């Protein structure tokens, strides 16, 4: 099992910056992809970014430029968000994937989520 804990969310003014962190524990050496989703009330959860075990990073097209996803080691990933807009207000959750079951169901663990509130 893999467990994830996010930190770094909070209140930030428009134009400000924030860095979210996610620490994994448990069977961390089975992890291949880690990343971030976000969700606001009434909207579907959307992918923000992810990074593979060989360092290939993918970003949501609409979020490129302001978001930077990094991985310090197999158990530690971060998300730097710059020039925040109010539209970035959401619960950000990190996830870790380590393959699929015999039936093709992804094996994924989720963090509890951290709220980012962009407001003046």
Image (spheres, rainbow, N blue to C red):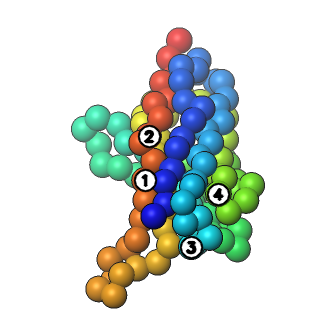
Mark drawn on residue 6: none
Residue 86 location in percent, x, y? 48, 26
3D distance between C-alphas at marks 4 and 3: 10 Å
Q: Quadrant of the N terminus?
A: bottom left
State whether residue 80 is above or below residue 86: below
Q: Secondary structure at mark 4?
A: loop
Earlier-in-chain disc, 2 versus 3: 3
Residue tagged by mark 2? 113
Instruction: Identify the residue position indicated by label 4 in the image.
Output: 75
- Could you tell me which secondary element the residue under label 3 belongs to? helix
Q: Nearer the viewer, residue 10 or 86?
A: 10
- SS for callout 1: strand
Q: Please tell me which residue is depicted at 71% across the width and 68% down the height of the picture.
A: 55
Quadrant in which residue 107 is drawn: bottom left
How would you rate the neighbour count of disc 4 (Cα within 10 Å): few for under 14, some for 14-19, many for 20 or more? some
Which residue is located at x 57 percent, y 35 percent?
7
Q: Are marks 1 and 2 in contact (CB under 8 Å)?
A: yes
Residue for point 47% across, 35% down: 114
């Amino acid at each position: 099992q893999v467990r994830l804990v996010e930190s770094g969310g909070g209140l930030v003014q428009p134009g400000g910056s924030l860095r979210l962190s996610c620490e994994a524990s448990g069977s961390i050496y089975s992890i291949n992809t880690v990343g971030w989703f976000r969700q606001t009330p009434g909207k579907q959860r959307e992918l923000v970014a992810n990074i593979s075990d060989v360092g290939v990073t993918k970003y949501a097209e609409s979020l490129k430029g302001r978001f930077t996803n990094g991985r310090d080691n197999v158990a530690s990933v971060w998300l730097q968000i710059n020039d925040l807009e109010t539209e970035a207000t959401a619960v950000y959750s990190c996830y870790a994937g380590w393959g699929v079951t015999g039936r093709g169901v992804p094996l994924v663990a989720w963090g509890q989520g951290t709220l980012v509130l962009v407001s003046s």
